[in-house]
Amino acid sequence: MKVRLLALITFFVLLIQSSILLLFIFINYERYNKEINEQTKDKILNIQNRLSSTLPLLLWNYNSEAILENLNIEIKNNLLLGIFIEYEGKTEYQVANTQRLNELNLNAQQFLLKDNATAPVELTFSNRDISEKVGNLYLVVDHSILERKKREAFNIQIFQFILIDIVLFISISLLLYQLVIKPIQKTVNGLKGIVTNNDVLSKKLPAHYIYELNELSNYFNQLNDYVVKMLNELHIKSDNIEAIFNNTKNALLLIDSHGVVQSANLAVSTLFKKDLKSAINSDIQKIINDERISNFIKNPIKQKNNLNFEIDLSKNGNLLYIAISISKIKQAHDQAFILFIQDVTEQHILYHDLEVALEKEQETTKLKSEFLASMSHEIRTPMNGVIGMLDLLAKTELNSQQIHYNSIAQTSAESLLVIINDILDFSKIEAGKLEIENVEFDILKMTGELAQTMAIHAQEKGLDVWLDSTNFDIAIVLGDPGRIRQILTNLINNATKFTQTGDILISINPYLIENQSLIFSCTIKDSGIGIEKHKKETLFESFSQVDSSTTRKFGGTGLGLSIVKQLCNLMGGDVNVNSEPNLGSEFTFTIKLGIPENQSQIQQALPRPNNKFKNIKIVIIENNKLGEFILSRLLSKISIRPECIEYNEHSIEKITELTPDFLIMDTSTTGNQTEEISKNIIRNLPNLKIVLLSKIYQLSNSTDYKKMGIHAEIGKPIIFEELLMSLEETPTHHHDIQESKKINIHENNKSSIEHSQLEITNKRTINKVLLVEDNWVNQEIAIALLESFNLTVEIANNGIEALALLKNQKKRTGYKLIFMDCLMPEMDGYETTIAIRKGQANTELTPNNRTLPIIAMTANAMKGDREKCIGVGMDDYISKPINEEELLSKVNKWLI
C-alpha cells in the first residue's frame, strides 16, 4: 500500500515538475531562437546599411574595383553565402563565399538567385541636383548556420531537462515519503466517510489525537464553511451579472472555440432583428458574416488579445454601422470569445457631416490664402511705383513748392503703406500665413534704439519719453525682433498720438524663466486722454477704436491693437490695458522668448560697471520727477547714489557746495540758459565734468558742446550703455554714436548710402547687373536706384529673355548679379532660376551653376515666399516696395 501510494504521488509530482521544466525549456528555447533571429537580422541590416551608404557613389562612378573590394570585405562574414548587385534585371556584380558553398555542395551560379536572397535594397545616388537609382542589392544568407545554432541550443536544453528531472525525482520521492505519506495514512480512515458521501460539504472530519492531523481536520472543516458562504455569494453575483448582461444597451455574445454562440443578451435580438433562442447555439457567421471574426477564432494564438473593427450593414437605404470588439477569455477546458457590439450609426453620420464641413472650411481657407497672396502682390507692385518714383523725384532739382508737394505725397504714400501693411498683416494672421522667426538678438539694444527713434515725434510734440530697463539684465535672447519692434512701434505710436502733454514711460519689467523660456514683459505708460472702462472690452478687436471721433481726429484703421494682441498670442503671450479717462493709459504685453543654448551668451551684451565709477560723486539737475527717478535707478546699477536738485536761482550755489565729479543736466529743465549755467559752474568748478541730457532732435554737434565746456551729451530716452560711456574720461566714441544717430535721423541715411556707394566704386571694376522684371514702372525705379550705386543695368522682360542674354555674356564682362522678379509672363522667376541652376544659361558665366548670385525682387511677401525663392536656387530676397538702404545692403553683401 505504501509503495503504490508513494509511487502514485511521486509520479504526479514529477509529472507536474516535468511539465513546468518542459515549459521553461520551451520558453527559453523560443527566446534563444528569437535572439539568434534578431541578431541575424541586425547583422544583415548593418551589412545592407554599410553597402547602401558606400556603393551608390561607386556605382555612379563605375568604380568596379572599389565595388568588388567592398563586396569581398562583407562576404568574409560567415553569415553570407553570396552578394550580388542587379541593375535593370541584369546582375552587374557578384561575389560568393566559395568555401562555404563547396561545404554545402552548392553551385554559386545556381544558388545565388533572387529566390534565395533577402529583399532587395534599392541603391540610389543623390546630390543637390539629381537623385537616380543605380541598382538593387541582394544578400544570400547561410541559413544552415542558424539552424545548427538552434539544434545545439535545443540539445543543451534537453540534457539539462533530463539531469534536473532525475535529481528532482529522487529528492521529491524521499521528501514525500517523510512529510506526506506517513501523516496522510493516519487520516485515511477519517476521510473515507466524507469521500464516499455525495454530500461532501455537509460532512465534517473528526478530531484526531495527533496534533497535525487535528489541525488538518479543523482547517478542512473551516474551509467547508467558507466554501458554502462563497457559493451563496457567487449565486448572488451571478444573478447580478446576468441582469447586467441582459439589460445592457450594447449586444454581447459568448462564443466557443468553434464559433458557436453559447450565450447572447436581449440587445442582440433588437440590433439584428433575430429571435434570441435561434441565435443561441447557431454559428456566429449566420448572425455576422465577417471573415475577421472566424479568422480570430480559428487562430487565437497568432492573434492579439482583442480585435476591434467596424462593419457597414446598411441595406435598402437603412443606415446601420456597428463597432465590434472581440476578446479572448479562458474557460475551464476550452478557449472562448466574447463579442461586444455597439451601434455607431449616429457617430458615422456626425463624422460624415464634420468631414463635409471641414472640406468646405479648407476650401474657404485656401481661397482666402490665394486671394490674400494675390492682393499682397497686386497692392505692393503699384505702391513700389508710387514710393519709388517719389523717392527718385526728391533726388531731382525741385523748387521749394515742388519739394513741399513731394514731401506731402511721400508722407501720404508712406501712411498708405502703413495702412496696407496693417491690413495685410491682419489678413496674414487670420489666414495663418504670418511667420514668427526665432533668431538671436540683443533685446535691450533693440528696445533702446527703437525708443530713441520713436521719441523724436513725441519730443517734437512737447512730450518727454523715458526708458526704464533697470529691472532687466538679460541681453541676448531668441525670438522675432521684427515682430517685437512692430508691437512696440504700435504701442508707442498710440501713446504719442493720444497724449498731448506729459510723459511716456517705456518700462521693461522683471522677467520670469519657466520651461527653458524667458517671459518678457514690457509696459508703455502715457498721460494721455485715457479710455473709459466699457470701451476697454472691445479695444483689441479688429477695426475697433474708442469711438468714431477718434478716427476723425487721430486717424488709423483700428487694426493696430488687434495686430498687437494677435502677435503677442502667436509668441506665447498677451496684452492688456489699465486706463482711466483723462488719467492716461498703461499697456502691458508679454511674450515668450528663447534662451540661447550657450548660457554664457545671455548677458554678454550687457555693459558691466567699472570699479572706477565706485567713488565718483554725481549731481543731477532735473525738474521732472520721473526723469530723476529713472536716472537714479540707472546710476544705482553701478553703485552710485546721486544728489538730485531742482533747477532754480540757487542751483549754481548748491552745486558749488557739493563739489561733484559729474553734473548731469537735462536741457529740457534749463532751456535756453544751459550754456550760461554751464560756463558759470565750470568757472567755479574747473574740474567738473558736465553731461547734458537732450532730446534726440536737439543734439548739439561736437564743436558746439566742446566750446561750452561740456564733457558729453546723450539723448533721451537714456540708454544705460550710453550713460556709462558719458562718464568715461574721454567719451569720444560715445559722441560719435550720437552724431551718427543724428545724421541718420535728419539726413535720411544719405551719408551712409554715399559711403557705401564709394565702397562699391572702389572695390569693383566690373559692375554690370541683370534686372529681370516685366513691369516698366518697377524697371524705371530699380534702374534709377541701381545706377545711383554706380551699377550698369540691363533689362530682361521675362525669363526667356534673361536666358538669352546670359548665353551671350562673356566671363570678364558678364553679369555679376541678377535681380529676379517672380511673377512674369512666358517664363516666371522660379522657372528661370531653376533653368540657370541646371546649366541652361552660360556655363562659362556660371561655373557649377552656383557662382552667379540671384536675388528675388518681388511683391510676393506672404509666409513661405522667401523660402520658396531660396528653395528654387535663389540666394537672397528683397520685397517690394523697394527700400533703398536695404537694396544697397544686398548689393554690398553679394558684390563687395
Image (cartoon, rainbow, N blue to C red):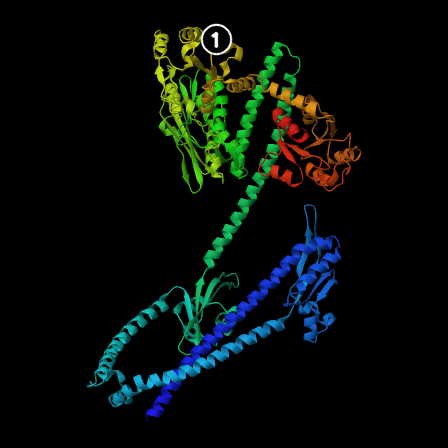
Residue 410, percent from left and from top: 59, 19
Tell me the kind of residue under disc 1. Answer: Met
Q: Quadrant of the C terminus?
A: top right
In percent of the image, x 45 and y 14: which residue is there?
A: 692
Quarter occupied by residue 408: top right
In percent of the image, x 41 and y 82: which residue is there?
A: 167
Q: Quadrant of the N terminus?
A: bottom left
Q: Nearer the viewer, residue 147 or 156?
A: 156
* Residue 282 seen in the current view: no
Mark 1 crowdedness (10 Å alpha carbons): few <14, some 14-19, many ≥20: some
Quarter occupied by residue 854: top right
Residue 689, percent from left and from top: 44, 14
Quarter occupied by residue 77: bottom right
Residue 229 position (above or below residue 318): below
Along the horizontal axis of the image, is 571 left or right of 171?
Answer: right
In percent of the image, x 66 and y 57: which residue is there?
A: 52
Residue 849, percent from left and from top: 72, 40
Q: Nearer the viewer, residue 719 or 636?
A: 636
- Name of the residue lying farthest toward the bottom: 1
Residue 166, percent from left and from top: 43, 83
- Check disc 1 and report its element: helix, strand or loop: loop
Residue 162 position (above or below residue 868): below
Q: How many marks?
A: 1
* Residue 815 seen in the current view: yes
Along the horizontal axis of the image, is 123 left or right of 338?
Answer: right
Q: Label 1 belongs to which residue?
A: 708
Residue 331 position (above or below residue 1): above
Residue 863 position (above or below residue 750): below
